[in-house]
């Protein structure tokens, strides 16, 4: 699918600020993809669709999760976690997008997971650092994004968990799996770190 076609598909489903966020995530993902040597076209398409289901009704998303192969434990966690997995399913059903790299980048863009691919990291990081964002500690993450993809992804994962814990939110297992796995990849798999 061409970029312009994808943009025309998602626009009616999003608010204006969310649409603009999406375009900035796509631009950021393109830059990261070319820097870190993953397919620019796939990263761009994944970014364009990453929040495709952000504003679907909770009832409809819950029904899709129940009726599909998506993990049912999603329903026990915040509905904010549903839009990525649901979008990865719907883009295949509705537009025939079968590419697993694209689908995984969309699926895991909110939580991350263990063993993230470079494509998954590119979209996960782009969503966090796009120029419209203003999180605490973002300058440090943006600087790192110029240098090291795994360390950058680790910072995003750590910051997200810290933010969620401060809010006393429940944290989905994949969110922790991402952090643990990235920590291991950074420290070379040392076994006895506290
Ligand atoms: O869709 P966006 O707003 O662009 O960004 P997103 O899909 O990365 O994240 C949506 C929200 O989900 C964000 O506030 C962080 C939150 N989140 C990420 N992991 C978890 C989580 N919320 C809960 N409750 N549990 C998680 O594990
Ligand atoms: Fe999202
Ligand atoms: Fe987003």
Image: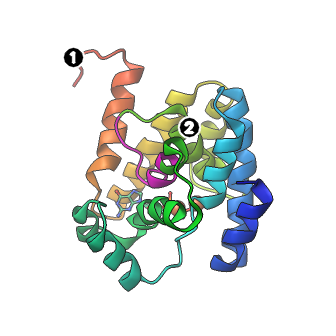
Furthest residue to the right? 4
Instruction: Say left or right for 60 vs 46.
Output: left
Q: Which quadrant of the figure shows ligand 3? A: bottom right
Say which quarter of the image contains residue 125: top right
* Residues shaded magenta: 104-114
Residue 109, position as x, y percentages in the image: 49, 52
For label 2, the crowd category at 10 Å Cα-Cα, with few meaning under 14, some 14 to 19 and many 20 or more, is many
What is the basis of the colouring in this image? rainbow
Residue 182 x, y percent position in the rendering? 39, 31
SS category of the residue bearing label 1: loop
Residue 8, position in %: x, y? Answer: 75, 69
Nearer the observer, 14 or 131: 14
Please identify the dominant SS of the magenta region.
Answer: loop
* Residue 164 among those drawn in magenta: no
Q: Earlier in the sequence, mark 1 or mark 2?
A: 2
What residue lies at 51% left-to-right and 47% top-to-bottom? 105
Q: Is residue 123 above or below residue 144?
A: below
Residues under labels 1 and 2: Cα distance? 27 Å
Instruction: Give the residue at mark 2.
Output: 119
92 and 55: which one is in front? 92
In the rendered view, would you say 83 is above or below 99? below
Tell which of 2 and 136 is nearer to you.
2
Q: Nearer the viewer, residue 117 or 9?
A: 9
Which SS class for mark 2?
helix
Cβ atoms at labels 1 and 2 below 8 Å apart: no
In the image, is residue 111 part of the stretch drawn in magenta? yes
Q: Residue furthest front?
A: 96
Q: Residue at x 42, y 46 (%)?
A: 112
Residue bearing the label numbered 1: 191
Mark count: 2
């Amino acid at each position: 699918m061409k970029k312009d076609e994808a943009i025309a598909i998602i626009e009616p489903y999003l608010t204006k600020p969310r649409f603009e966020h999406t375009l900035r995530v796509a631009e950021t993902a393109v830059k990261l993809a070319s820097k870190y040597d993953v397919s620019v076209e796939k990263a761009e398409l994944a970014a364009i669709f990453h929040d495709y289901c952000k504003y679907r009704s909770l009832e409809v998303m819950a029904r899709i999760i129940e009726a599909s192969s998506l993990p049912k434990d999603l329903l026990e966690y915040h509905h904010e976690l549903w839009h990525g997995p649901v979008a990865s399913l719907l883009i295949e059903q509705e537009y025939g997008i079968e590419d697993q790299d694209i689908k995984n980048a969309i699926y895991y863009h909110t939580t991350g997971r263990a063993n993230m691919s470079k494509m998954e990291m590119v979209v996960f990081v782009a969503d966090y650092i796009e120029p419209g964002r203003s999180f605490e500690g973002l300058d440090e993450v943006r600087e790192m994004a110029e240098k090291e993809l795994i360390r950058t992804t680790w910072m995003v994962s750590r910051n997200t968990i810290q933010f969620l814990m401060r809010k006393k939110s429940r944290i989905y297992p994949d969110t922790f799996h991402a952090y643990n796995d990235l920590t291991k990849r950074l420290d070379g798999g040392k076994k006895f770190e506290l």
